Amino acid sequence: MTAPLLAALSPSHCPSLLTSTISASRHGAVTPRRGRRACSWSTARGRGGTVSRISCSSTLDDTPAGLITVAKPNYVKMKATVKVEHADPSNRKVLHLELVSSDLDSRKEKTSIPGDAYYWGTDPIRGHEFLLEAIFDVPVSFGPIGAVLVENEVDKKMFLINIVVSPDNNESASVTFEGNSWIKPKSGDTVKHVFFPLKSYLPSETPPGVESLRESELKATSGDGSGERNKWDRIYDYEVYNDLGKPDIDDNLTRPVLGGDVHPYPRRCRTGRPRSDKDPSSEKAGNYVYVPKDEVFSPSDELEFLLNKGLMSSTPGLWTMLDTSERKSLSFPSFTAIDSLFDDTVVEQPPSTVSAMLVEMARKLLNAWRPASDTMEEALQALKGLKFEMPQLIASDRFAWFRDEEFARQTLSGLNPLSIQLVTEFPFVSKLDEKEYGPRESGLTKELIEEQIGQAMTVEEAVEKKKLFMLDYHDMLLPFVNDVRELDGTTLYGSRTLFFLTEQGTLRPIAIELTRPKGKPPILAEAWSQVFTPQQWDGTGSWLWKLAKAHVLAHDSGYHQLVNHWLRTHCCVEPYIIAANRQLSRMHPIFRLLHPHFRYTMQINAKSREKLINADGIIERAFSPGRYSMMLSSAAYKEHWRFDMEALPADLIRRGMAVEEEDGTLTLTIKDYPYANDGLLVWESIKEWTSDYVKHYYSSAADVTGDKELNGWWDEVRTQGHADKKDEPWWPKLDSRESLVQVLTSIMWVTSGHHAAVNFAQYPLAGYFPNRPTIARKKMPVEEGPDRAEHMADFRAKPEKELLEVFPSQFQAVLVMTVLHVLSSHWPDEQHMGRHVEPAWEADPIIKSAFQKLQDNMLKNEEIIDERNGAGDLRNRCGAGVMPYELFKRSSGAGDTGKGLPYSISI
């Protein structure tokens, strides 16, 4: 409790507050001296004993009856105003509250004061929010109020926004108790919900009167690995990914468990659902996936997601139209047919809310749905009603996707700028077993590379001068090639794509190597590999280069979605959230720092396990490598994920894209690398904010090492959340303020900047799927095999048809476009970095000042980004038809904007 409220509890503030406004008789009506209010006096027995009450109703308006408890001598009349959503005004008595003292004094008469909160009215600004009010007689000796306990009195859920407690006639001395939590219906269990004031406390500083509440609240949210969760629980626990398959429905939908020695993986939130009848290692599929209630969307966001769910529910209608054995593999007959999916006749204004956008998308899908037919023409006719908004890339330059320079530019400022790496060694040699996969030597030879760079320098000189860069998916994908090739309608290679850095600071693609490993028994085919180059002055060579690019883009799209997007942001962040709720009290300053960065991530992840990454879900149906997608994600986690490399500077250094100088500053290997240039602005802004915050609460390294909750959280992240890597030596130790700042900044960067970079350009860049095909359905026509001669003949006759048959099918393309339109959209209620301020930050003057610095820095960053996007010498972000790089501009409206920096992974 703040000093003003302590002062407000002195005896001088204890007059009879009612006698100046009403007169009453013991058993009669109470007549107000002004206004037309009818009041009556009654005595009732409540949870706290017998209390005298005056119930008043107004005849002037529709305001429900107020409730006032008569003050006693040496008592202070206190008012609690509760702001909620989802309340029912017809229920006058809504919540039962208890005020809990911060003091722990055995001489006190009581350490908590009960009272009931009644419906009072609606918020005058936000009409969907309801105000409840409770009046308490609080002894002057009670001391500061350290917590409020809440129970629901109605059988209806509600979302509690906050509680404000103040002396009845002195609201300036109020204390706010942080809410933003769902209150379960009365029919749920009787565990009381605890709310603490906005003032943050390290464990050692906890007021004595609420120490036990601090500990019991953490115990109440920590699971013990047993029991099935229900939808009103707020229990956090760990489980492996054993819920992606559906073996009880179909044996073909069985999927391996991710997490453990065989397939290492981060942990998810435990649901406790029953095990599958056919596969006891897997959970049984159900209609509901548990998410702790405080991780579920607030009511306003819930409405948006219901519309989203409606849109996603309409997608099976689209599947019904196209996903039949006759239709699901239909290719687009021409690029004109692809272009007909987009509406470029009208420049549409972006919808004002995501609701409007989703409704419009649902309308388009419904218009597109038609009964199943057997002919391509009827299928195309059915698609004519489905018109997508023109993606930003193609709206700027219709032929951008076709150009090699755009293909290269997007490795630095596109949807996946996290895979490009500097070449530091030559020749290129695989680390895979030669006996199983074939020759380890690459076909990217010295002679070929030097020819492609015009003999300007030797390969050795190019490596020394940092001129060669690569997308390397060779060793990562090659182990999956034979399995993927057994699936219908897809193929796969291991790939290496080599780029040369020009004098203008842009990359030029010079070669693509595609590799097929040795065949699996009983088909013992020899390994096959071929290098394709862009400088081909004949039609066949030119078209083969375009086909090779399509394969590489499919590899890059799959790796982007499964590793750099899903794994490194959504998946790896969930253990941080679970551990925080089990180990960090809600009054802990680090919990309050991280809270906006964790908003809705677990809910989004649960929906992803239901619809996106599950067996036969959207990823498996439309992305490479199909049903082996999550095994690829697990393999990447095993081989490459390290917490200490998730910091942006460390990631850039690891990939050779930056060098750390002696003074600690970074020098980028490619000067014009928009993702790194702008990302480092955001990184430094986050780090400065985090440093100011940590230094305010921790005065020394001893404070960090002595914080039992903080160290419990970090230990649990390592040993339970990322249990398969718990013994790795690279885990940072929380032994100083600086190490704590680095850990927190890394997490906050991943949830904000990293996720924004790989998410919010999905539709603007990949909505026109030839620019980023998500799957390659047909092998290269020159690949050795019994059908090579026939395949080459078809290719030479109709090379455009060959490319269209490599691209995703009609079904896959429309499905992906629909999903990307939703997933890359901003929500109206998003909390953007440096704009939204948490109430606890605002309540502390020093933290509020530090946050103002963050706001100022984010505004400066936007100005710098705008200036860079207008600099003609920065060709990777400025030029004719070139999309500006705006993903790290903090603000965005709703919809697909290609910019905006939310705190959290909330979509």
Image (cartoon, grey):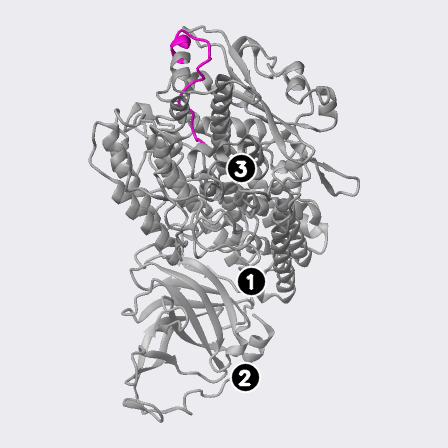
Label 2 CA crowd tier, 10 Å (few <14, some 14–19, many 20+): some
Say which label, 2 or 1, has the lower sequence index. 2
Q: Main secondary structure of the magenta part?
A: loop
As measured in the structure, the alpha-carbon distance from the residue carrying label 3 to the one carrying label 1 is 29 Å
As measured in the structure, the alpha-carbon distance from the residue carrying label 2 to the one carrying label 3 is 58 Å
Q: Position of residue 789 (x, y in %)?
A: 41, 8
The quarter of the image holding the N terminus is: bottom right
Occupied quadrant, residue 646: top right
Q: Position of residue 167 (x, y in %)?
A: 49, 78
Label 1 CA crowd tier, 10 Å (few <14, some 14–19, many 20+): many
Q: Which residues are magenta?
A: 773-791
Q: Position of residue 772 (x, y in %)?
A: 47, 33
User: Visible in this render: residue 617?
Assistant: no
User: Visible in this render: residue 378?
Assistant: yes
User: Tags 3 and 1 in contact by the CB under 8 Å rule?
Assistant: no
Location of mark 2 (residue): 11
Q: Nearer the viewer, residue 897 or 595?
A: 897
Point out the frontmost of discs 2 and 3: 3
Occupied quadrant, residue 618: top left
- Image-based side of 691 in relation to 292, left or right: right
Q: Residue at the spot x=30%, y=38% of the render?
A: 286
What amino acid type should be assigned to the residue bearing mark 1?
Answer: Ala
Point out the frontmost of discs 2 and 1: 1
Say which label, 3 or 1, has the lower sequence index. 3
Q: Under tag 3, what secondary structure?
A: helix
Question: Eyeballing the image, is 523 above or below 861?
Answer: above
Label 3 CA crowd tier, 10 Å (few <14, some 14–19, many 20+): many
Location of mark 3 (residue): 568
